[in-house]
Amino acid sequence: MKIINEIKTMAKDQKIDIYVDMDGVIAEYDFGRPLDFLNKRPLLGNIKVLEEISKIPNVEMHILSICKKDSQINDKNVWLDKYAPFFKKENRNVLSKETYTDRSSSELKVDFLNNIESFKILIDDDNGILKEVDKKVKNISLYQDSSIVY
C-alpha cells in the first residue's frame, strides 16, 4: 500500500508523529447521531492499515480529534480501547468545543500541531482542516483519509 511505503521511507531517517482524526477516518461519521460516539461503526480497513503503520520503527501514533461535548472525550477513549487499542492512552488528544468555545475545529488542530516540534503527519477527512493546516503548520505532511483505504 502506497501510504505505508511512503511512511517507511520518511521514518528511515527521523522520528515521525502521526496524528489521526477519528470521525470519518477510523469511525463512521453519522450526521444523524453525532453525539452517540460509543455506537459508531469502526472503519476496520482503515484501522488495520493504521495498526500496520504503528509498527513501523520511528513512528508514534496519536489521535487528534475534536468533539462537541466534554462527555464525549471519555466515550471516544472507550471506543478506542475497544476498536483501536494500539493508540496509547497518553497519545490520545481529544479536544472539546465545550471547553474551547471560541475556537473552530481547524483552529484547534492548527494550534495543537504548531506546538509539536518533530516532523508530523496529519490524516484527516475534512478538506477544510487539511487546507488550514497546510497554510499554517510547518514541518508536516498531510493525508486525506482516502489515502488509507484498505
Image (tube, grey):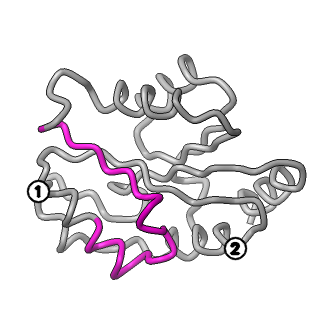
Q: Which residue matches tag 1? A: 71
Q: Residues within 10 Å of mark 2 (few under 14, many from 20)?
A: few
Determine the residue located farthest toward the bottom in the rendered image: 82
Specify the quadrant that holds the C terminus: bottom right
Q: Secondary structure at mark 1?
A: helix
Give the answer, above or below, for where 56 lies relative to 61. below
Determine the residue located farthest toward the front in the rendered image: 90
Count of number-bearing discs: 2
Relative placement, left or right, of 36 versus 136 is left
Residue 95 in magenta?
Answer: yes
Q: Secondary structure at mark 2?
A: loop
Which quadrant of the figure has residue 120? Answer: top right
The numbered dot on residue 102 is none
Residue found 15% across the figure and 44% down from its top: 68
Magenta segment:
77-98
Which quadrant of the figure has residue 24? Answer: bottom left
Q: Which residue matches tag 2? A: 55
Relative placement, left or right, of 17 versus 108 is right
Report x, y in % for residue 74.
20, 64
Report x, y in % for residue 127.
45, 34
Q: Earlier in the sequence, mark 2 or mark 1?
A: 2
Report x, y in % for residue 45.
51, 74
Specify the quadrant that holds the N terminus: bottom right
Residue found 22% across the figure and 57% down from its top: 73
Report x, y in % for residue 32.
10, 56
Relative placement, left or right, of 106 versus 95 is right
Looking at the rendered structure, the kind of residue marked 1 is Ser
Residue found 33% across the figure and 82% down from its top: 82
Residue 2 in magenta?
Answer: no
